[in-house]
Amino acid sequence: MPGPIQSIERAAAILRLLARGSGRLGLGDVAASLDLPKGTTHGILRTLQGVGFVEQDHTSGHYRLGAALLHLGTSYLDANELRSRAINWADTLAARSGEAVRIGTPLDGSVLVVHHVFRPDDTPQILDVGSLLPMHATALGKVLLAYDAELAARIRRAELTSLTRRTIVEPAALARVLGQVRTAGWASEAEECMPGEASIAAPIRAPGGLVVAAIGISGPVDRICAPSSTPAPELVRDVHDAARAVSRDLMTDG
Amino acid sequence: MPGPIQSIERAAAILRLLARGSGRLGLGDVAASLDLPKGTTHGILRTLQGVGFVEQDHTSGHYRLGAALLHLGTSYLDANELRSRAINWADTLAARSGEAVRIGTPLDGSVLVVHHVFRPDDTPQILDVGSLLPMHATALGKVLLAYDAELAARIRRAELTSLTRRTIVEPAALARVLGQVRTAGWASEAEECMPGEASIAAPIRAPGGLVVAAIGISGPVDRICAPSSTPAPELVRDVHDAARAVSRDLMTDG
DNA sequence: CCACCCGTTCGACATTGTCGAATCAGCCGC
DNA sequence: GCGGCTGATTCGACAATGTCGAACGGGTGG
């Protein structure tokens, strides 16, 4: 296995770094963060600038992500088989449950939101397609973890950051929950990611049975978790049915 | 000027190619399209796969864009100074005009939509942030062309594709229109891009006076172009005011 | 006016990516 | 069920390519 191309890997690392920092970074910062000589970093940065993946502030010299990436990102969405199949089912799930719907895929130890349907009421909401959600504190993430041993192993090595008082931070506790997810076929979460918010999710399977994504709803904890503190059974059923419908849709073609 | 890094340029070319095809491509297709040996292409593709920029269909072996690009794309939006400043003004413009608002930036000879506010009525609309619009057939594009000599020169060499019966395809006619845009300070278009649709746009200037983007509205031609066939003066004023407001907002800081 | 910081340039080295042919797997037609 | 094909993947040798570190230059703040 002759190694991957390092200049490309370094370029990708720079792009990820710029995406994290969510702002412009100087050449020195980039070089220091990646332990690269300034000259090398500059060469990569200039190339990335040439192809439109990064832009440079002409006054400060700082670098930021470039416009070409936005187009590539939406091109990814357009070509995404999963998303195009799931859109209709997501809409019906939102209408039936009255809650916001999200579809997530694993990316780099987090959950990437690839589709988002607003809650049907008229409250102002922000579109978070493209956002990263924590794996261990969301229903979507728990589903993905439960059905992917490799992901679960990676998470086990990572630090489970606490987002609220109820976030699961004990690896053993998380493992137990994941086992329950596997037997039940769905996952839930209540105030583990954001106070007052709860969510339910179920797995989406590609042809072959592999879990490639998860679909779920999220909303106020007192609506998601019925009278008791457990998720409302009819909502669980709605989510589960939607997930099965999408999975079935994915089966029926090449 | 020691040349840009070729492996990165080739990787970018592959990504752009995958974005165009809007579907999965085989290794052979990619290699042929870029005049590269299959072995080389495979190495780059494998590296891109490793960093999540492309994914591979395990059954057919075809390649498609990867999920990491989606996150980079939205990270670009989050870090985008122009967009964050413009959001509020775009909302007020949409409310005042009653039409859909778009903000566009030049990308590679086209207009990249970086922000999109839906028309205030409840008609179903699709978000086209990240889409590419033709330069010569949209008000946004005309504005960008009028104030950027380099872009205008490039467009002059390109073929002006006809989208509707009214699309401007004569380079001389386009040049005349661009001159009018420069003197008027705004651009318009009626059924040159889509039948029944018209649009108005004005330039957004960065500190220094350089035109870096355009903001505009679009809607049914009978609402945009008042009784006569020319754009409604009050809409033109609204767009122009919004553009000035955003530009002023960009001035007032570093 | 000087000193510092930071982006940029340059040239030599050897590491790194490139190339083309050989291999392997899957698919269709026979 | 068996050949021939298309298309993805592997391999190894060559040299072109990217890497590195030091020196340059412009801008800013003291």
Image (spheres, coloured by chain):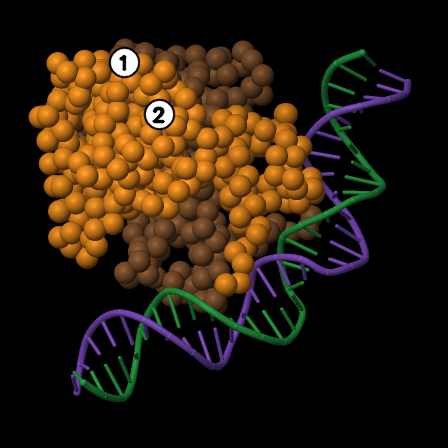
Chain colours: A orange, B brown, C purple, D green
Residue A252 higher or lower than A137, as above or below: below
Q: Quadrant of residue A222?
A: top left
Q: Is residue A243 left or right of residue B35?
A: left
Give the secondary structure at mark 1. Answer: loop
Q: Is residue A27 visible in the rendered structure shown here?
A: no
Q: Residue at x 23, y 27 (%)?
A: A188
Between residue A104 and residue A49, name the one nearer to us.
A104
Q: Is residue B135 left or right of residue B9?
A: left
Q: Residue at x 14, y 35 (%)?
A: A240
Pinpoint residue B172: horizontal percent, then vertical percent: 41, 41
Q: Residue at x 39, y 42 (%)?
A: A153
- Which dot marks residue B178? none
Q: Is residue D30 left or right of residue A230?
A: right
Report crowding for label 2: few under 14, some 14 to 19, many 20 or more residues within 10 A (C-alpha): many
Q: Earlier in the sequence, mark 2 or mark 1?
A: 2
Q: Quadrant of residue B254?
A: top right
Give the secondary structure at mark 2. Answer: loop
Q: Please give the chain letter of the residue carrying mark 2.
A: A
- Which dot marks residue A168? 2
Residue tagged 1: A196
Residue A100 higher or lower than A211, as above or below: above
Pinpoint residue B109: horizontal percent, then vertical percent: 43, 41
Pinpoint residue A182: horizontal percent, then vertical percent: 22, 39
- In the picture, which quadrant includes the C terminus of chain A? bottom left
Closer mark to the observer between disc 2 and disc 1: 2
Which residue type does callout 2 highlight? Answer: Ile
Which residue type does callout 1 highlight? Answer: Gly
